[in-house]
Image (spheres, rainbow, N blue to C red):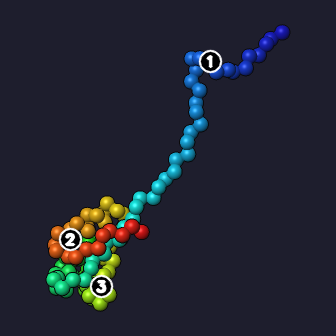
Amino acid sequence: MTILSSPRATASSPVQAPEKARVRQPYPQCRVIVLDDDVNTFQHVVECLVRHLPGMNPDRAWELAHRIDGEGSAVVWSGPQEQAEHYHQLLASEGLTMAPLERI
């Protein structure tokens, strides 16, 4: 008669704990907002937007400058937080009046 042994965990064999489910957090997204002020000219705002924001063209920059003037502010760029921080800093260094980054 043959006796079949069942597999058992021994002191030398590792016991695996159940894996924890990973929860993926989406990367934070932010809006870069320029505020109206009495210091910067339309031309300066347009030049800064075109120089520092990817894909910005002069026509779109003029639209945004008019929105900033007329409505008091405009979202000029939105996307990943790290890039938003960079663009926010560049525009602020040019003297534009910036709102704090707004998380989406």
Which quadrant: the C terminus?
A: bottom left
- Indicate whether 42 appears above or below 33: below
**Disc 1 crowd, CA 10 A, few/some/many (<14, 14-19, 20+):** few
Q: Disc 3 residue type?
A: Gly
Q: Disc 1 residue type?
A: Thr
- Count of labels in the image: 3
Q: Disc 2 residue type?
A: Ala
**Disc 3 crowd, CA 10 A, few/some/many (<14, 14-19, 20+):** few
- Can you identify the residue that label 3 sits on? 72
Q: As rendered, which of 96 and 87 lies closer to the eye?
A: 96
Q: Image check: 19 left or right of 102?
A: right
Which residue is at a point 36% across and 70% down the rendered structure image? 102
- Can you identify the residue that label 1 sits on? 10
Determine which of the numbered discs, if any, sits on residue 92 in the image: 2
Q: Position of residue 15 (x, y in %)?
A: 59, 26
For residue 49, what is the image quadrant?
A: bottom left
